[in-house]
Image (cartoon, grey):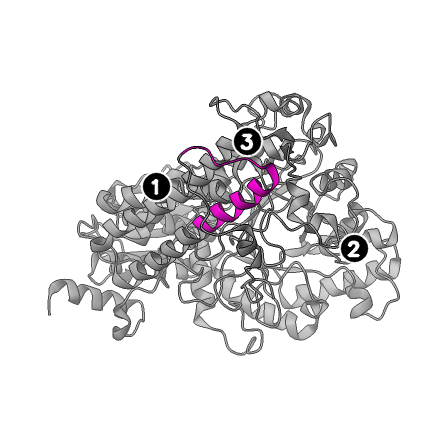
Amino acid sequence: MSNALKRGLFACLLAGVATPALAEDGYDLWLRYHPLTTSGIADATTVAVLGDTPTLTVAGQEMQRGLAGLSAHPIQTSVAMRPGGVVLARADTPALRSLTLATQTLGEEGYLVRSVTLEGQRVTLVTANTDRGVLYGAFALLRWVQTGHSLSSANLTSMPHVALRVLDHWDNLDGTVERGYSGQSLWDWWTLPDYRDPRYTDYARANASIGINGSVLNNVNAKADSLTAPYIAKAAALADIFRPYGIKVYLSARFSAPIELGGLKTADPLDPKVAAWWRAKADEIYRAIPDFGGFLVKANSEGQPGPQDYHRTHADGANMLAAAVAPHKGIVMWRAFVYAQENAEDRAKQAYDDFHPLDGTFASNVIVQVKNGAIDFQPREPFHPLFGTMPKTPLMMEFQITKEYLGQATHLAYLGPMFEETLRADTLAHGTGSTVARVVDGTLDHHALTGMAGVANIGRDRDWSGSTFNQANWYAFGRFAWNPDDTSDAIARDWAAMTFDPTTATVTPVVRMMAGSREAVVDYMTPLGLGHVMATGHHYGPGPWISDLKRPEWNPYYYHRATKDAIGVERGPKGNAATAQYAPALARLLADPATTPERDLLWFHRVPWTYKLRSGGTLWQGMVGHYDRGVGYTAGLQSAWTALRPRIDAERFAKTDTFLAIQHREAQWWRDASLSYWMSVNGLALPPGAKSPAHDLDWYKAQHFPYAPGNP
């Protein structure tokens, strides 16, 4: 048996994996801990954990597992210092008193990693003010080694910029996942609380490795049953598993639960009986889950019940629930996605119209959760106008990690650039530099309650997220939630090194593939500010021609208004004045097509097909160019991946190779179907050299997908 195979077998046995499962299936995510050709940890033989709390214990286990896998030799746990070893300890541990370490600024979750001398031995120390900080530091040190650095050179200090870093699971009690493209729900509600699937622990490990500290277990389109005693017990079982990893559980609360569960005649938030019912329910939950995080609420949106049913405000509803959890130090995350039954003017304006007048009226333990854009997780949206215009209210960013509108599971679309684009966007609320990131991390308006939520892309698929590259979006969300000032390129490099191998020959082409992938999706789906032109319901594939559904905003036509003469929605002063919802300095720029970023042109303005772009070409020529560029990028992805075949394991290579072929085919479909429709409207010919669509418009309209995933 070769030494390489021996090392592989040892790593598998250490991780508790049966030896036949040597093939890579993506289960290990970015925590693969496979032997490195130049590990930089040859001298590490021990991990010393100074303390025996549950969190310190799992930190020590992770460090032992990681170093053993990366070095392919046994790593022992010890309470004694050994040369070259790793020591995990809180800053207040007596053994550290002789050291002068700047830990006072680390807060409750920050960490420090240094090479120090303890008891006469040179060791690598991971320390923090709390056990959670030590755990995050342990994962940071493992990342440092995984990405090709030597253990002894680690000099790491970091603390989170955002307090609440939460995954929102749109998981239903029947095991389906709304907008889920990676299998059934991770939570087996039927066998909980008795059977505690080992995957729950691995889920917690993965989240802790990127700093995620909260998990909303159930769909925002909540069932009241989630708040009954049997389901509270099931949530408590998950909370017990997650607790050592620093993760709190939250529940989505159905606003009408006092009626459905409590037998009350009303859910009016100003009714004392309703408030009393919620207080009793909160007390019940906290008896089972003492560190329960609180509630996430979707109200008066898409048919969900809420305070407006009783002519009350969103603040009335949020504050009533906030009072129920306040004695337990819980919080309420109240969503600003208010896609109502009636929306007379513009769906994009509604959240601002509902919430902006309420600025400063929410309780101190309420944070308003705002989607990154004003409509609904499109491949590209301008940032939401509430960011920068509610200075008295903490606002929590909501990103969608699952790719509902970006090709779902099979298209490679690295969302790091989208997260970065949104967070870097300048609201101009207090002059230049008033970025969305500064709103989210609380520094712009001096808020301590801060948060970022991501709609999870996790299911029971062996690779967790439906494909290897979808895992990068989960990873990138965690990194940006920890530090909104991070960069998508740096995050992609770390992910690629940990997921494949840290050599330049692998990392550079993988990162290059990822870097432009989201922009390619924008190009072949929604160029130049188009949005929501997907087929309705399942949101799979193009449907810009749909215009006959009951409610206007259900129709893709509502979002582009294309006619023979022009295309786009006029949201400037000559239209519905949605641009005025932004801070005045930015509103002035967006009011004029000439000063609106071209990437958002058709979002904010209705312009002729002959409108001149900055390139000198017409809008129509530019649109065709974008479609072709997007399709071309997908062909480049296939070529780049083929060149990586010798460097990628067979199983993950084959699945990605197949998905890239699907993406290229579907990008062509998107391009051809869209151009067929636009030409039927504007009567224009394709620019010289542009290929004609493969089929006529009727063929594209006839495509039907009744069982597309993610739409239970």
- CA gap, disc 3 to disc 2? 32 Å
Q: Are marks 3 and 1 in contact (CB under 8 Å)?
A: no
Q: Quadrant of residue 368?
A: top right
Frontmost residue, 483 versus 551: 551
Secondary structure of residue under mark 3: loop
Neighbours of disc 3 within 10 Å: few (<14), some (14-19), many (20+): some
The answer to whether any part of residue 446 appears in the image is no
Residue mark closest to the camera, 1 vs 2: 2
Residue 654 falls in image quadrant: bottom left
Which residue is the site of mark 2? Answer: 306
Q: Front-most of 514 and 65?
A: 514
Position of 656 with respect to 280 (left or right) is left
Q: Which amino acid type is shown beneath numbered disc 3?
A: Ala
- Classify 90 as above or below 219: above
Q: Which residue is mark 3?
A: 425
Specify the segment rendered in magenta: 668-688
Question: Relative to residue 374, is residue 113 drawn left or right?
Answer: left
Q: CA distance from mark 1 to mark 2?
A: 57 Å
- How far separated are the C-alphas under marks 3 and 1? 45 Å
Residue 687 included in the magenta stretch of the image: yes
Q: Earlier in the sequence, mark 1 or mark 2?
A: 1
Residue bearing mark 1:
98
Of residues 236 and 613, the one drawn nearer to the viewer in this rendering: 613
Mark 3 or mark 2: whose residue is earlier in sequence: 2
On the question of residue 693 being in view, the answer is yes
What's the residue at 74%, 32% (across, down)? 576
The amino acid pointed to by label 2 is Gly
701 over 434 or under it: above or below: below
